Image (cartoon, helix red, strand yellow):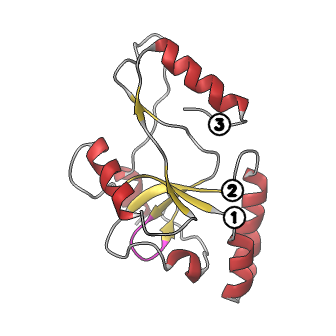
Amino acid sequence: MSHKIATFLMQGQDWNGEQDPTGWIISEKLDGFRAYWDGSSFLSKNGKSFSVPSEFTSKLPSNVCLDGELWLGYGEFSTLFSIFIKTYNLQGDSQKLELWKDVKYCVFDAPKHPGYYLERHAFASATISSCGNNVIMIPVEECLGMGHLQTKLEKITEKKGEGI
């Protein structure tokens, strides 16, 4: 299973700073846990399942695969990691749900949907529109050039974001 997940999930690439980014599709990179929704459970990019309260997943579509990030907020990665550890050891869903109340699933792709990335992004956005406040779409935009890219990155780093 893990090999199959790794082969079709979108991966970012390092930028050498020399290429002109004009026309690239850019979005904020969040500091959370990469999570693939297969229609019934969350899996890591290595194919391992996350212990997530059923109340959290019950609002997600069962017929669509999504790719995104489980995220708690800026500077909260260690707190999110601790929630994952605590959740793994809990038996009751109500206790898990209390820990997960502020966790967001930030979606950026529907990798099995046909089409180019922007078509998949639009499809994913429409699909999750009724999933509740804990499921959000990561906005994307076309890069207008080096200045635009640098301004975006500065705004993200000012709020302690991870990058683009």
> Viewer-proximal residue, 149 or 130?
130
Residue 56 at x, y = what percent? Answer: 57, 75
Q: Position of residue 43 (x, y in %)?
A: 50, 66
| Mark 2 residue type | Leu
Tag of residue 141:
none
Marking on residue 162: 3
Q: Please indicate whether residue 35 sits to the left or right of residue 103 in the image.
A: left
Q: Is residue 164 above or below residue 116?
A: above
Furthest residue to the top? 18
Q: Residue at x 43, y 41 (%)?
A: 11
Question: Horizontal and vertical percent for residue 49?
Answer: 54, 71
The magenta span reads 37-41
- Per the image, the residue denoted by label 1 is 102
Q: Label 2: state its secondary structure.
A: loop
Q: Is residue 95 magenta?
A: no
CA distance for labels 2 and 1:
6 Å
Q: Residue at x 49, y 47 (%)?
A: 138
Residue depicted at x 56% and y 65%: 133
Query: Which numbered marker is on residue 72?
Result: 2
From this view, report whether residue 24 is shown above or below residue 7: above
Left or right side of 86 for 161:
left
Q: Earlier in the sequence, mark 2 or mark 3?
A: 2
- Disc 3: CA contacts within 10 A as few (<14), some (14-19) or many (>=20): some
Which mark sits nearer the N-terminus, 2 or 1?
2
Q: Main secondary structure of the magenta part?
A: loop
Cβ–Cβ under 8 Å for marks 2 and 1: yes
| Residue type beneath disc 3 | Glu
- Tag nearer the camera, 3 or 1: 1
Residue at the location (72% across, 59% down)?
A: 80
Residue placed farthest to the left in the image?
114
Residue 98: name its quadrant: bottom right
